[in-house]
Image (cartoon, grey):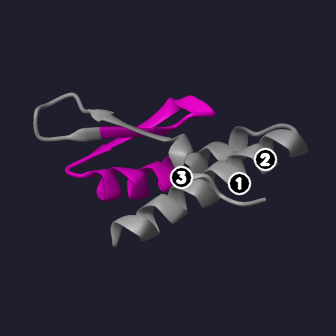
Amino acid sequence: MASDESRIIVAIGATAHTVSVHHRDFPEIRAEGQNPGDAAAYLVNHLTRALDSALTQWRRETMNQAIAEVQAFVAGKGS
């Protein structure tokens, strides 16, 4: 399955100097950073930790795909 970086949502963070990033399929899992690349790198960590609570194979596959898409986004940002 090819990754789709358009599923990565970047928004203004809680403060003026941060951005918030989440994956379209997992809006409840967010990360903040000083720039989109840093925030997305943190998001990879949050999604990886969330794999522990994925109870079905389908959910794990979906989360793994989201992780791959966020990692591609990070790689594209040069982080």
Of the numbered discs in the image, which one, if any, rests on residue 60?
2
- Which portion, as a residue range, is magenta? 20-46
Q: Quadrant of residue 2?
A: bottom right
Q: Residue at x 76, y 39 (%)?
A: 54
Secondary structure type for disc 2: helix
Mark 3 and mark 2 lie on one chain; the one further toward the N terminus is 3
Residue pointed to by mark 1: 64
Relative vertical location of residue 39 with respect to residue 2 in this rendering, above or below: above
Relative vertical location of residue 56 with respect to residue 45 in this rendering, above or below: above
Q: Quadrant of residue 1?
A: bottom right
Label 1: how many Cα within 10 Å (few below 14, some 14–19, many 20+): some
Q: Disc 3 marks which amino acid?
A: Glu
The x, y position of residue 15, in whole percent, is: 14, 31
Q: Disc 1 marks which amino acid?
A: Asn
Label 3 and label 2: CA atoms lie apart by 19 Å
Q: Nearest the camera: 26 or 3?
A: 3
Relative vertical location of residue 13 with respect to residue 17 in this rendering, above or below: above
The x, y position of residue 10, in whole percent, is: 36, 39
22 left or right, relative to 68: left
Q: Disc 2 marks which amino acid?
A: Arg
Relative vertical location of residue 14 with respect to residue 60 in this rendering, above or below: above
The x, y position of residue 32, in whole percent, is: 31, 42
Secondary structure type for disc 1: helix
Label 3 and label 1: CA atoms lie apart by 14 Å
41 left or right, relative to 56: left
Residue pointed to by mark 3: 5
